[in-house]
Amino acid sequence: MKKITFVAGALLIGAFSLLPFLWFVATSWKSATEISAIPPVLWPSFHWEHYHTALAQHGLLGYIANSAIVAGSTTVISIVIASLAAYALARFKLQWARYYLLLVLALSMFPQIAIAGPVWRLLSEMGWLNSYHGIVVAYISLSLPFATWVLTTFFKELPYDIEEAALIDGCSRWQVLRHVVFPVAAPGVFTAAILVFIHAWNEFFFALIILTYPAVQTLPVGIALFPGEYTMPWGEIAAASTIATLPLIALTLMFQRRIVQGLSAGAVKG
Amino acid sequence: MKGSNDPVLRFLAPSFLFVALFSLYPIIESFRLSLYRMILTLPWLGQKFVGLENYQDLFGDPVALQSLLTSITFVAVTTPIEVLLGLGMALVLNESFRGRGWLRAIVLVPWAIPTVVASQMWRFIFNDRYGLFNFVLFGDATDRYWAPLAEPGLALLSIMVADIWKTSSFAALIILAGLQAIPRELYEAASIDGASAWQKFRLITLPLVKPALLLALLFRTIDALKVFDLVFVMTQGGPADTTNVLQFYGYKKSFAEGMIGYGSAIAVAVFSLSLILALVYIRLLGARLLAREQRA
């Protein structure tokens, strides 16, 4: 009896999580008549034309490239900056380290609208609106709090003896970080990188206000502003959505354990 | 670790720079701008200091008050449901069974999907002519089909459904981490004493997972207050402003209408609301951090 309830629960959770999205993916393979059919067509006839239209007419490739560039650079730069900060916060016994971490954490909680106007004006004065570097600096500052927090947690858990030995042997702090800490902490750093990447890939609000030219817009903006006033091109939207989600599903399936670990390091362990 | 303070600044400087320039300064600047009248579409007005006038306008603005109420309703309805669903999921995911890794990965799918994609997906499901939602409710009686996203009574509810689907798994992960920290021996001892499954849940699991539940609730509350993508894609704040949450209203005033001063006043109001929540959160987490360092 207990087993049956459990299996039913597991199936229910799987269906709840997966079915709505699978329905949308199936939509991307349906013909226009299948999409609007009542009763709905469950099994698509695997039309690829929506993918073709999305790529050829709606510039999907450009959005993908923009997203990859923006999320990729954000991840690399913020992980480097956050690692430096996290190492200092974890290893130098700073009186104010705790308060700095808490301040950074508090800043990350505020709704984007609280800083959006001034960030926009700042980037505008620098001439950085509608540019990769403009959106990337905004994203770096958005992801730094989380990355610093998670990495500090990871670094604190590393044994200090090896580092101490290296320091005594005359290594500089920088050398210790590069040759001792980074290799040992690689799994944690990688976990933080995955989470920063997913966040940057999915971010919409700042992309919407900073990137107003289609040539630089990322996937979420492209998908949200998909043209279609009277009849929505659902097939194309579903195709673009599937493509935008594919890398994330791949990351999730490959690194499920790390992601779970990273998210809980950011939250529960504190 | 004497003399180790030397490189501190070099290690922290880049991080300081970003935090100062793109987090601290914008918040202070939002405060300053909220005291000015500044409208981008009327640039000849310039930047005129008006004191607290924007705030007076804000408190007398029925749309702003409705917006505040909408945000609070959204938070109050979605977060408890998300935490309860998360608890249910976490309890299942905490058992050991074949395929647990797969189920954990599947549960992560809604969390990993871009919110914009989830928004379009639910917009399609709630479509008024061929949405799955209508078919499930009314079958092929198309004349009875609803337009949930265009009905004042249903639009907010539809966005809530989308949000619950998207974020319950995040709550589940935090609660799962809490469940995993409960020592197995407690359950074994309880079994020996002849405790039933319900007794074990009520007397061991629930009290010990409470901090994680609280944390998930706070995380979700802070996040739900920021809801924007779902509203932007699914309803644009309509119909009749029934889904016009604070973050969307602030965006509309500042960026669509160019009312920088008034938009900043909304930003400050939202900021203050979140600050109260953040303080609660930090008290909770700060206490843990202190306890950890004292142990170390």
Image: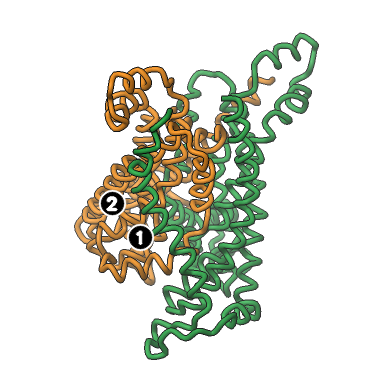
What chain does badge 2 belong to?
A
Question: Which residue matches tag 2?
Answer: A70
Q: Residue at x 36, y 53 (%)?
A: B17
Q: Please say if B249 is above or below B185.
A: below
Q: Relative to the observer, which residue lies in front, B81 or B9? A: B9
What chain does badge 1 belong to?
A
Q: Which chain is orange?
A: A
Is B56 situated left or right of A26 in this image? right
Q: Secondary structure at mark 1?
A: helix
Q: Note whether residue A197 is visible.
A: no
Q: Are marks 1 and 2 in contact (CB under 8 Å)?
A: yes
Q: Quadrant of residue B88?
A: top right
Residue A182 in picture, x, y percent from top left:
32, 28
Residue A184 in picture, x, y percent from top left:
35, 23
Residue B142 in picture, x, y percent from top left:
53, 62
Q: Relative to the observer, which residue lies in front, A255 or B218? A: B218
Question: Which residue matches tag 1?
Answer: A207
Q: Residue at x 65, y 38 (%)?
A: B213
Q: Which chain is green?
A: B
Q: Please say if B3 is above or below B221.
A: above
Q: Please say if B89 is above or below A37.
A: above
Report, in whole angstroms, how far the alpha carbon at label 1 lies from the one at label 2.
10 Å
